[in-house]
Amino acid sequence: MSAEQAVVEPAGPAGPADTKTGAWPHRHLLDTDALTWPQVERVMDLADEMREIVERRRPRSDALKGVGVTNLFYEASTRTRVSFEVAAKHLSADVVNVSAGGSSIEKGESLLDTMRTLEALGARVLVIRHAVSGAPYLVAREFRGSVINAGDGRHAHPTQALLDLYTLRRHMPGGSLEGRKVVILGDVLHSRVARSNLWTLTAAGADVWVCGPATLLRGFEAWAAAGVGGARQFTVTSDVTAALRDADAVMALRLQQERMAAGLLPSVHEYAARFGLTTERLSLAAPGCLVMHPGPMNEGVEIAPDVANGPRSLITEQVAHGVPVRMAVLALCAGVAAG
Amino acid sequence: MNATATRLVPGEVGELADVELTAWALDPVAGRSGPAALVVRDGVLESIAWLDDARGVDDRGVIVAPGFLDLHGHLREPGNEAAETIATGLAAAAHGGFTAVCAMPNTTPPMDSAAAVRAALAAAAASGSPVRLLPIGAATAGRAGERLAPLGELVDAGAIGFSDDGAPIEATELLRNALAYAGMLGVPLIDHPEDPAQTGGAEAHDGLVATVLGLRGWPAAAEANAVARDIAILADVVRDVPTARLHLTHLSTADSLDHVRRAKSAGLPVTCDVTPHHLALTDEWIAGARRWAWAAIDEDGTARDPWRDGAIEAPSFDAALRVNPPLRSPVDARACRVALMDGTVDAIATDHAPHTEVDKAVEFGLAKPGIAGIETALGVLLEAVDAGELALDTVLRALTLGPARVLGAVVSGAGTPALVEGRPADVVVFDRSDRWTVEPMTLRSKGFGNPLDGRSLPGRVLGTIARGRIAYGDRERG
């Protein structure tokens, strides 16, 4: 991807975005595959600064003052949409929320027409959630500002991957994932979170395992053989025991009811029994193994309630970190667009 | 350009052609190619003299061949004239070097009645283009796959074959009956092989690219399955109806071509075509790679990894690349080229499938499938020839004699693809060494979005003459 590679790093708006040096060439954030490792670290460092702002009694930066940020959500979302909204407001952006229900989208307006309308109404950053893989790429071809992918179909959820990485680094000694065993467990086939995490976690040097029922791993053995980015290896297995043994972190993925109807799984019950992240299974992992979930959870299905709410769970921390990480992404990309 | 070719196609579309040229000529019926001097006067091929002395004429410059015959085009009229009309479709065909186009029946309403066939032929006549429109009637009423269309009436009105293209004939018993009945009428049944149980919601070839991009996969097995079923039914039908003929269109996978190869060696009356895009493009284009299929595969036959190679250069998810069957792996594309060279594949058909901006400038998975490729077919194929992947003679035969044989006796009277003196000229003249750039301005089709947009291709068509009349003449060089 990345048609925007030729864009030159501009001065950027006043605010925390200026406090770090280093090239940030991306006007859009469509997936983590476009990011070099130094660029990922740039997001991490800036997110640290943003977190300091967030933790103030009155969290405010003027980084995006007067910048129109529109959240365009074609799929239902609570945490991601609110997280982007809070992040943009902390940066003093003018935030508008559009959801598919109750808009002209329901009347059949095309995605590009909706984009042009929102652009005419002042949107300079478009945060898009869409059920069709690749939809934000279509918008990015024509939109003059920045497009931030907030989840497209099964394809990508780059800010989730970045906040997952941010969260993991804060709990790893030395802040490094090098050689750490990270397991992505569940419905990998349909997961944009898994795909975006594969790029960042393998780039971070983690020993990544993806684990789930064979029907929900379709195609991943071939991807593992090819390597992420054509190089970085990961392991694919349906053997939960092997996957969890000595793991340093486990990300459980949401299981949708549709998977049973589509004939991919016999039953929720069987899934929970064989692949659910339980305390017993977690005991196979390394002591202090971190537990994550992108939400929303089906407690008792892909993750047991005592694990989700247990001492190793970083799930609410993930949600909290979403705000500074998205502030960092918004500031960086909008800075390029402003230039 | 060759100086002796200056009197090439000087007139307007529809006028009788007057041409004198010396160029590399190819006659697939005679099985002959070499330097030749041609004279066309008042539309008639007055003389062709094969020259012993090459005089600097070779097969890398100006080439004259019988006009191309496309077995598979979607001209969209009636029902979707914003995407293409019969007039614009025929103009595009002529620009691509085609002098005859089979029109698929998936119009709105579908071409499943004699009146609809006559209307299409009338529109072609009214267009002023001398390019022949060859109607393919729907195999089943309304293309609904429930009962046979009025096949006899369709043939009487001018249909030259039957197909429910766009979809397979799913009901196996109906396929059997359609094959037998079409065989009785002396025309081929053309199937679009796809097992729909495996392709619901599919967006891209089920392979590495689809996995990485999170696109729903269209498995190669869904095509191989359908091809195997069709061949098994054909084997049964020919026992009763020896004239039954099955043509499988737009084959795209190694396995389905193997099925055809075996069926042909068993003597079954099956033919098939492949498209230029399945020969030359691959699924990695969806990820943003822009190299030809032959550059995406190692010598040992392993597909290369565009991410490892750093071959991703364009934005991902260009909806211009959404097509059915989908662009396949480099291994499948190579199998298509091999099958063309070894004779398993009879014809190259474009599956020219134009769509409007409304249907194409949308999310990848919501875009209508189809590539409007009738104008870029020759250039893409010549790229493969230049790369040493295909032989020029094989390509030109697969655009002329190959498809004529698929259609059989029906069109042979109208236009055998041979350079025969005393008959109305039906030829294409192109310059293999002259490149042109694919842009909306250079294309006659109304179709929105071409995956080759901005790319230069070899083989500028200088002139196309159909039935003795000018169908296309290059303004700069004609």
Image (cartoon, coloured by chain):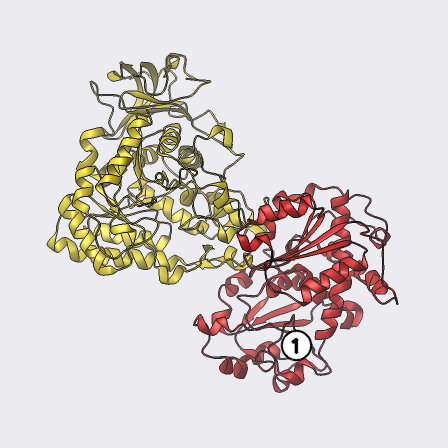
Disc tally is 1
Query: Where residue B47 sits in the image (x, y, percent)?
Result: 24, 15
Q: Is residue B315 left or right of residue B143?
A: right
Label 1 sits on a secondary structure element that is loop
Which residue shows up at 60% across the image and 50% down it? A137
Chain coloured red: A
Kind of residue sitting beneath label 1:
Ala
Q: Is residue B473 left or right of residue A209?
A: left
Query: Where residue A250 sits in the image (x, y, percent)?
Result: 65, 75
Residue B177 appears in which quarter of the rendering?
bottom left
Query: Where residue A298 sits in the image (x, y, percent)?
Result: 59, 77
Residue B313 appears in which quarter of the rendering?
top right
Q: Name the one closer to the observer, B125 or A175.
A: B125
Chain coloured yellow: B
Which residue shows up at 65% across the image and 63% down it? A202
Q: State the quadrant of the C terminus of chain B.
A: top left
Q: Give the residue at mark 1.
A: A247
Res. B245 visible in picture: yes
Res. B310 visible in picture: no
The residue furthest right is A57
Chain letter for the residue marked with disc 1 in the picture: A
Residue B124 appears in which quarter of the rendering?
top left
The residue furthest left is B240
